[in-house]
Amino acid sequence: MYLIMPERNGEWQYDPGTCMAIQVYVKDHLLKDEKVLFPYMMSPTIQIGKFQNAYEEANLGYMKEHHIKMLRRDTGGGAIYLDDQNMSFCFLFPGDNDIFGNYKKLYEPAVHALEKLGVKNIEQAGRNDLTIDGKKVSGAAMTLENGRIYAGFSLLLDPNFEAIVASLNPNEKKIKSHGIQSIRSRVDSIRPHLAEEYQQMDVWEFTDYMICAFLQIDSIKDAKQYVLTDEDWEHIDQLVAEKYNNWDWTFGRFQQFEYELTERFSFGTITIGMTITYGKISNIQITGDFFGKKDIKDIEHALLNVRLKEDELIEAVQPFELIDYFGGLTAESFAQFLLDTRQTEQTTTGKKEG
């Protein structure tokens, strides 16, 4: 099995889109008949499944306030929170491997490795989870594409419980859609379950240990590594720009959903109902008990076919004096209202420099 580290010129890459693009590029173009292991750790990110509605799965206000990014992966499953305190692992297997759909077998090397660190009562549970004493410490996903099995899971060594709960718990809004909703389970940390002699393991030591377990080697120096070339990075950079760090891939893939929100302002209540088609406002109605000098249909018309993206919403209403339609709203505060990002609970989270 080859090991590919997400490193460029010797530096670890924390950008979520880059981490994903490395894996997909290799899957589609390199080491066709080989097994491959990709460890990755990224800056705080909500990673959603291929078939999920980004607006439905996350608290965008909390994410904006705490600088948490959004990333859509190429496999199904639910939304998860990833950061730079916990390592994730992805694998490529030849299509004739009997691991496809067998999450127990996928997790097997991790289970054995964690048991050697003193972890007890660890098992694969449900459809695709890994649990300790019935609490989730990992979620896995896999897909079969072009004759290769692409699979992966995270291992929650030191999860940020506040961020997990807050970022994966959308603000109260009425969203009706045909999306696949995440089934959120209680989560736990692996660290408290480690034997005493391993309690001080940092995330890098833990990662090296797990890599050696997956590759069945004694030292990272013994790993069969593929180092990405400058030509590889050119293709990866292109994939990052065109897909994983592209708003349309992350937010605009969902065909259609209905989105409604209400807020009480000093000048009255505004209720907005929208139909969103591939990330754009295809229908909108604004109602409320506010007083306006001008016809609200001007604003509704200006927002048609505009992407549900803050800078584009601001640009659409910037030409209008919103006080003539509602009251004391700026273009910025109106856009944040549409995205439900105006008010979030004031909290503090820690972040490791990376």
Image (cartoon, helix red, strand yellow):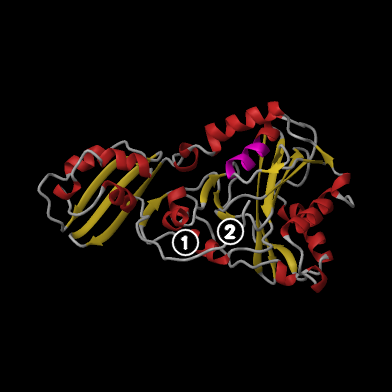
Quarter of the view holding residue 144 = top right
Q: Which residue is mark 1?
A: 169
Say what amino acid the circle numbered 2 marks.
Lys
Q: Local crowd at mark 2 within 10 Å, few (<14), some, or many (≥20)?
A: few
Does residue 303 appear in the picture of this structure?
A: no
* Residue located 88% across and 50% down the image: 217
* Residue located 55% across and 48% down the image: 49
Q: Which mark is residue 221?
A: none
Residue 141's x, y, as percent? 64, 49
Query: Which range is magenta?
Result: 16-24
> 46 or 110, which lies in front?
46
Distance from the alpha carbon under mark 1 to that under mark 2: 20 Å
Confirm whether the magenta stretch covers residue 19: yes
In this rendering, position of residue 308 left or right of residue 144: left
The quarter in which the N terminus is drawn is top right
Give above or below for 159 relative to 275: below
The mark lying in front, picked from 1 and 2, is: 2
Check disc 1 and report its element: helix, strand or loop: loop
Check disc 2 and report its element: helix, strand or loop: loop
Q: Local crowd at mark 1 within 10 Å, few (<14), some, or many (≥20)?
A: some
Residue 308's x, y, as percent? 37, 43
Residue 340's x, y, as percent? 36, 55
Say what amino acid the circle numbered 1 marks.
Asn
* Residue located 25% across and 40% down the image: 318
Q: Which residue is mark 2?
A: 351
Q: What secondary structure characterizes most of the magenta part?
A: helix
Confirm whether the magenta stretch covers residue 265: no
